[in-house]
Image: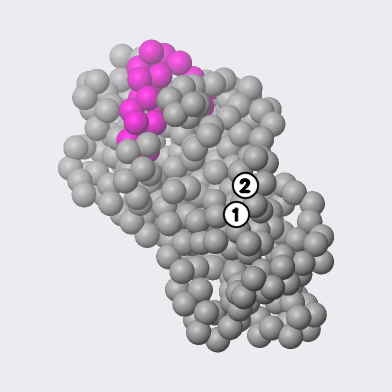
Amino acid sequence: MGKNKIAVLTSGGDAPGMNAAVRSVVRSGIAKGMNVYGVYRGYNGLLNGDVEKMNLRSVSDIIGYGGTMLYTARSEEFKTLKGQQKAAKHCQEMGINGVVVIGGDGSFAGARALTNAGVNCIGVPGTIDNDIACSEYTIGFDTAMNTAIDMIDKIRDTAQSHDRCSIVEVMGRRCGDIALQVGIACGATSILVPEVRYDIERDVIARIVDTQKTGKKHFVVVVAEGVGGVNDLAKYVEQRLGIETRATILGHVQRGGSPTLRDRVVASIMGHKAVELLAEGKGNRVVAMKENKIVDYDITEALEMPRVFNKNLYDIAKTISI
């Protein structure tokens, strides 16, 4: 039977909710009478034959765990045409002609290459940064933001006790969505993101000074990873304003932890959709969220979409965080 053997893998950076997506793929596939295989450590697993047949109990109780039970890795070999052909050959030898790839843009480019080599692939967006242009929402985003808020709330407690300014870096290399939404949620005086050109005097110093005039004595500045420079910024604020200032880089704490309800539910729905597409014999597609509905796009179309930053939300943040 052509479409009764499928596989699932996680690739790129891990994200809370990936396990929920894996669970959904496995159980949705089995419900359709498919044999479902788990591929360990991303595309490396396809190259090295690190593949295991899954059953209903293989994914028991993983929905609440962060990270990915299938592990993840980046593969230099798979980036080559020879590597892609080798992976496709291994799939064909095992009778696998459909693969669900959970990851980001780089993982989707790999899925497109594997589809072109003869194995239908469906991409599912899993990345905490929310930086997939075709999808309003990516698996892991909500959990990462809630983790960041929890950390910043704790930092705020000590900043308030000491009348300090805290500069906090959150994840997001090319995308400021975590910084923007977390900044609003924690009442940051200033939010710096890679999508908006900023001026330190206007966007940080002047905002702190204006807030000081209203009687406030402690401040939080949220900075996206793609902007960086938080240690230098902390030194500058302290020298410029005489306010004791500390920099904190939250780092990989944002990647871990039990996924939120939203990440568990969205991952479950997206995983189910991916299996439906493979059951229909489709490949080279990406599952996405648009206007809060689950849709799918051609991978090439999805990869070429320009990412749109929510400038209106950024302007609202500037208005109310003072």
The residue identified by callout 1 is: 320
* Residue 160 vs residue 169, the one in the foreground: 160
Residue 21 makes an appearance in the image: no
Q: Is residue 128 above or below residue 220?
A: above
Amino acid carrying label 1: it is Ile
Colour setup of the view = one colour
Q: Which residues are magenta?
A: 267-286
Residue 82 image offset from top left, x and y in percent: 63, 34
Residue lying at 66% horizontally and 53% vertically, measured from the top left = 318
Residue at left offset 77%, top offset 77%: 236
Q: Total of numbered circles in the picture?
A: 2
The reply, left or right, for residue 205 in relation to residue 172 is right
Q: Is residue 53 left or right of residue 85?
A: left
Residue 316, which numbered label? 2
Please tell me how crowded label 1 is: few (under 14), some (14-19), or many (20+) other residues with Cα within 10 Å: few
Question: Does the magenta-highlighted stretch encompass residue 270?
Answer: yes
Q: Position of residue 175 (x, y in %)?
A: 64, 48
